[in-house]
Amino acid sequence: MSKENPRVLIIATSKNTRGGITSVVKAHQQCPLWEQYRCKWLETHIDKGAVHKLLYLFKSFFAYLFILPFYDLVHIHTSEPPSAVRKVPFMMLAKLFGKKTIVHFHSFSLETTINSKYKKVYKYLFQNADVTLVLSAYWKKEIEQTFELGNKVSILYNPCSLADRTTLYQRKKQILYAGTVNKRKGYTDLIKAFSKVSQSFPEWQIVFAGNGEIEQGELLAKELNISDQVIFLGWISGEAKSKAFQEASVFCLPSYAEGFPMAVLDAWAYDLPIITTPVGGLPDILVDGENALVFEPGDINLLAQQITTIIQDETLRASIEKKSTELAQTIFAQDVICSQLSTIYKVCLK
């Protein structure tokens, strides 16, 4: 293909799949680079049963065989081992056709990926890629040390998607948690920490937006006698998501492991002050007491203290809120990240 009009083929999960990769690619899709590089999103995975997943993969690979010759660069998004294993044949064929390749790594765990029994799978993908993109300095260091990739690893932060304020909502005394309701995200820690201070702030609530262990969460809230202050919305999107973020006054993600959490980026996009843990790519940015309130994963007592602090200290809350807005409009602005990706494409295609 002519390098004057290059074309980029995006290999990623389905547009209807819930998760960070889908959110990231959709954000990229809104940027000028999508038209500039005539990008096409080839969906290779779907949230259904095993048979449907396999059929979907075969269908995607069959399409890939026919369209690959018409593209100059293959941008592969991957994360945990099932995703990485699925991407190996796509990489093999791309190299066979002499295409430039980018592997965009979104994982949250060393132990399940590059330090696991699947280490060789990741080694193959990273060593054969012209560029490996990671979400933070932490992941750059770990991958470079593990695979000796030299200068082939670059950091590209996930972007803050534009906040939807088509309909405006007033803020309430709510602390919002957004993401899958599971152990890794630390949802029980938030319930337990809030129960320690709930009587002091009876007008405040915690709101959980996400699918997962909702029944278990409701049971825990009942056991701790705070059911009337805990709300589970389930999985939300569109207008319901905008409403939840606009009505919240604080965002909390007590996670144990992350790549770079899209939920935090969403919170920044909606100008919310955050309470969170220094995991994944967040330590690149977080300054406790300046642009966030921080606690170590599992430290329920400190989380309870941080909740108390941000509820009581309205001046601090406003200050952190201002920093959230700055981050959303500068370092993590969608146009900034897309400009960086466009530059990566340009260099890779030389």
Image (cartoon, grey):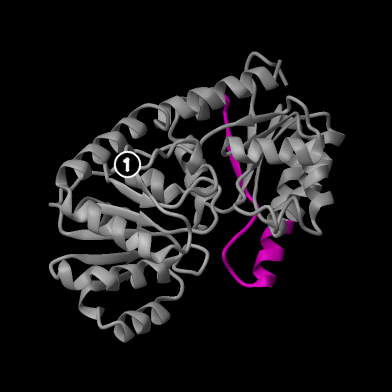
| Amino acid type for the residue under numbered disc 1 | Gly
Side of 208 relative to 259 (left or right): left
Q: Is residue 137 magenta?
A: no
- The location of residue 35, given as percent across then percent down, is 51, 27
Q: Residues within 10 Å of mark 1 (few under 14, many from 20)?
A: some
Instruction: Residue at 63% x, 18% y: name it.
Output: 346
Residue situated in front as seen by the camera: 77 or 293: 293
User: Dividing the image into 4 quarters, which one contains the C terminus?
Assistant: top right
Q: Is residue 299 visible?
A: yes
* Residue closest to the far right: 96
Is residue 288 depicted above or below 254 in this figure? above
Residue situated in front as seen by the camera: 215 or 66: 215
Quarter of the view holding residue 225: bottom left
Q: Is residue 52 magenta?
A: yes
Please count the marks in the image.
1
The magenta region covers 37-58
Instruction: Residue at 65% x, 51% y: name it.
Output: 79
Quarter of the view holding residue 14: bottom right
Question: Does dot 1 land on a helix, a strand or a loop?
Answer: loop
User: Dividing the image into 4 quarters, which one contains the N terminus?
Assistant: top right
**Residue at label 1?**
289
- The location of residue 283, given as percent across then percent down, is 49, 41
Side of 149 relative to 44 (left or right): right
- The location of residue 317, given as percent across then percent down, is 21, 45
